[in-house]
Image: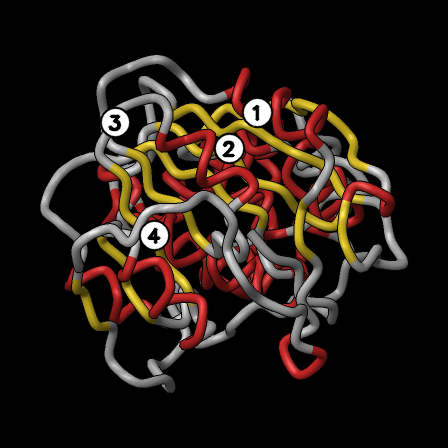
């Protein structure tokens, strides 16, 4: 697993950004044996390898014991990967670093050499459900979450590590620390914090704190076909976070402010609410009202 430093960004042309990287390649080879992956952190990829055994144990403790196979995004040198293999469950890796992907294939593990922020790799993934485990790269975390959300029925549980500031967008959706992607994710998953991770848990250490979250699919999860229109509406509403929400929503959906304020009363929003006040449950009501005939 590796870290990539940078700023997360959210695409504005639908939940999935246009595909830009090469197609994913799925292959496997006979194991060469041995536990230790040989790799130096690449400055060009901003890699930070997870090395803290205590953190690894806590992440493993958050992975459910169901028999579903595991999908690990960004295994890196494999400190977590080797422990996941001990569970004797099918394991598939997604690794952008060509050198590391080659080494994992040589160890006999199905490995997609792909950019996980590009949805092309989903078509090469075996057609079954997976538990997702990942130390997400900083500069692609939100893009990867959007990819996973687009096929959420295949990923009922996800244990993901983020830069702490980005994690707060999911764990504190509906507050000033949240954001549109956090609200969208909460339409599909219940999110809880597993642990905070200090820079010293990585080699080399990053300059920021990290946080591990667990995502469990909701019984009333929004259907996949609703996510693109919901995402577009959320982006419109959050363009001006300090503007009144009733005006922004009325303009976005072509309804009168009086009608929108009636929706607000229905879901318990104040008339002068701002986008930061919008909880996932309230957005669900507003979204469905806006799409009604």
Cα distance, mark 1 to mark 2? 31 Å
Label 3, residues with CA under 10 Å away: few <14, some 14-19, many ≥20: some
Asked whether the viewer can see residue 7, the reply is: yes
Whether the residues at callouts 3 and 1 have beta carbons within 8 Å, the answer is: no
Up the image or down, 66 lies above or below 54; here it is above
2 or 4: mark nearer the eye: 4
Numbered circle sitting on residue 93:
4
Q: Is residue 101 left or right of residue 271?
A: left
Please name the residue shown 66% across and 54% down the image.
49
Contact between labelled residues 2 and 3, with CB atoms less than 8 Å apart: no
- Find disc 3 in the rendering and name its residue: 89
Q: Earlier in the sequence, mark 3 or mark 1?
A: 3
- Which callout, 1 or 2, points at the residue further toward the start of the chain? 2
Q: Earlier in the sequence, mark 4 or mark 1?
A: 4
- Mark 3 vs mark 1, foreground winner is 3
Q: Position of residue 72 (x, y in %)?
A: 40, 45
Number of the label disc, if any, that sits on residue 159: 2
Tell whether 132 sits left or right of 272: left
Q: Spatial distance from mark 4 to mark 3, Cα to Cα? A: 13 Å
Instruction: Give the image location of residue 6, x and y in percent.
Output: 74, 71
* Residue 15: quarter of image: bottom left
Front label number (1 vs 2): 2
Regarding residue 293, the answer to whether it shows in the image is no
Crowding around mark 1 (Cα neighbors within 10 Å: few <14, some 14 to 19, many 20+) is: some
Of pointers 3 and 2, the one earlier in the residue sequence: 3
Q: Say few, some or many: other residues with alpha carbon within 10 Å of mark 2 (under 14 / 14 to 19 / 20 or more).
A: many
According to the image, label 1 marks what residue? 267
Give the SS element for disc 2: strand
**Label 3 vs label 1: CA separation?**
44 Å
């Amino acid at each position: 697993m590796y870290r990539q430093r940078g700023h997360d960004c959210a695409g504005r042309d639908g939940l999935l950004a246009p595909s830009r990287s090469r197609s994913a390649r799925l292959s496997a080879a006979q194991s060469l044996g041995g536990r230790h992956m040989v790799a130096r952190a690449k400055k060009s990829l901003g890699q930070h390898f997870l090395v803290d055994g205590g953190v690894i144990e806590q992440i493993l403790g958050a992975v459910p014991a169901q028999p579903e196979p595991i999908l690990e995004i960004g295994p890196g040198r494999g400190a977590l990967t080797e422990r996941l293999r001990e569970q004797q469950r099918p394991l598939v890796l997604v690794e952008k670093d060509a050198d590391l992907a080659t080494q994992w294939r040589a160890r006999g593990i199905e490995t997609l050499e792909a950019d996980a922020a590009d949805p092309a790799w989903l078509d090469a993934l075996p057609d079954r459900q997976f538990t997702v485990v990942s130390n997400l790269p900083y500069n692609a975390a939100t893009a990867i979450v959007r990819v996973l959300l687009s096929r959420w029925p295949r990923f009922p549980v996800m244990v993901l590590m983020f830069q702490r500031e980005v994690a707060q967008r999911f764990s504190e959706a509906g507050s000033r620390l949240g954001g549109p992607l956090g609200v969208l994710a909460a339409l599909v998953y219940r999110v809880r914090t597993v642990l905070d991770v200090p820079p010293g848990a990585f080699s080399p250490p990053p300059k920021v704190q990290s946080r591990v979250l667990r995502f469990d699919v909701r019984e009333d999860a929004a259907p996949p076909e609703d996510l693109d229109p919901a995402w577009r509406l959320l982006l419109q509403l959050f363009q001006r976070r300090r503007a009144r929400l009733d005006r922004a929503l009325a303009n976005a959906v072509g309804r009168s402010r009086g009608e929108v304020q009636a929706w607000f009363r229905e879901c318990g929003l104040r008339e002068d609410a701002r986008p930061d006040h919008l909880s996932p449950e309230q957005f669900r009501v507003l979204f469905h009202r806006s799409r009604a005939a």
